[in-house]
Amino acid sequence: MSKAAENWPPEDTEPATPHPDAPPSGTELGEHYSQCFGCGDDVESGLHIRSMIASDMTVVSKFTVGKDHQGAPGLAHGGLLACAFDEALGSTVGNLLRRPAVTARLETDFVRPVPVGSTLHIAAKLDGVSRRKTYVSAEGRLDAEDGPVAVRARGLFVTVGVEHFTKHGDADAISQFRDVRQAAGQDWDINP
Ligand SMILES: CCCCCCCC(=O)SCCNC(=O)CCNC(=O)[C@H](O)C(C)(C)COP(=O)(O)OP(=O)(O)OC[C@H]1O[C@@H](n2cnc3c(N)ncnc32)[C@H](O)[C@@H]1OP(=O)(O)O
């Protein structure tokens, strides 16, 4: 455990309570939005992260580092790894609590280099809730669920109303997103 992990969550929290309609363990989550840099299939150089519900408090994600994700030759860019963890943590909050939330704070510890071609196995868990704030943390292991830890991250996600996205984002794209999701019988307002 890193020193940075000592005061986490940084305030008194209540245990997170998974939403009654949260997907059950073993559910593959797929993309949440086709244009999402983290998980969208339509973003050629995106991260194409895939996540699965592991328990009512944890989500596991896989990210394979490609040539478009490099910093130094043959190694993943650190900021891009932070992006992967933002996605994995956000997916954990959104899918288990089923309410819209955005990243307010994201911390990353880079423990060992992550080569191109390797797969990070990211295990994320809900750590606690305080009013609109949800604390969540994750470890990413190299090439296997029990591989060496390469990256640790923790984040604060703040619950927002869906107007956060309609007001600040692309309202037309959100309408289209809503229509596609509703046609498929899926919620659209968890995390557009
Ligand atoms: C399935 C989907 C996966 C998606 C994964 C990707 C997720 C993302 O990347 S989201 C995009 C990146 N994030 C953003 O764009 C968010 C931009 N920021 C904002 O919109 C606002 O600052 C927002 C909504 C976070 C907070 O604003 P606001 O709603 O006015 O709430 P505010 O009162 O300031 O803060 C709420 C609480 O959070 C705390 N807080 C807010 N920001 C921070 C911060 N950076 N550090 C610590 N605490 C913070 C506040 O102190 C406050 O605490 P308390 O309740 O104890 O008073």
Image (cartoon, helix red, strand yellow):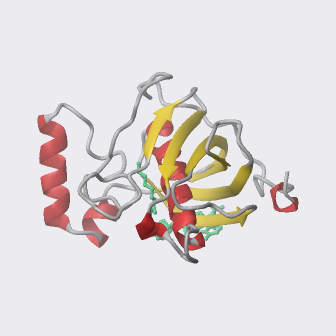
The quadrant in which residue 133 appears is bottom right
In the image, taking residue 76 as reference, residue 12 lies left or right, namely: right
List x then y, in percent, for residue 176.
12, 54
In this view, 125 is above or below 158: above
Total labels: the figure holds 0
Q: Nearer the viewer, residue 103 or 146?
A: 146
Identify which residue is drawn at 56% across, 28% down. 54
- Residue for point 73% across, 50% down: 149
Q: Position of residue 62 (x, y in %)?
A: 51, 44
Placement of 18 over or under 30, stated as above or below: above
Image location of residue 49, percent across then percent down = 43, 49
Q: Is residue 53 above or below residue 181?
A: above
Query: 52 left or right of 177?
Result: right
Task: Work out which residue is located at the far bottom of the displayed protein and give it.
Answer: 72
Q: Nearer the viewer, residue 64 or 166?
A: 64
Residue 89 % position (x, y): 55, 50
Q: Image quarter for residue 5?
A: bottom right
Looking at the image, residue 74 sits to the left or right of residue 102; the answer is: right
In the image, 76 versus 93, the foreground residue is 76
Q: Nearer the viewer, residue 94 or 85?
A: 85
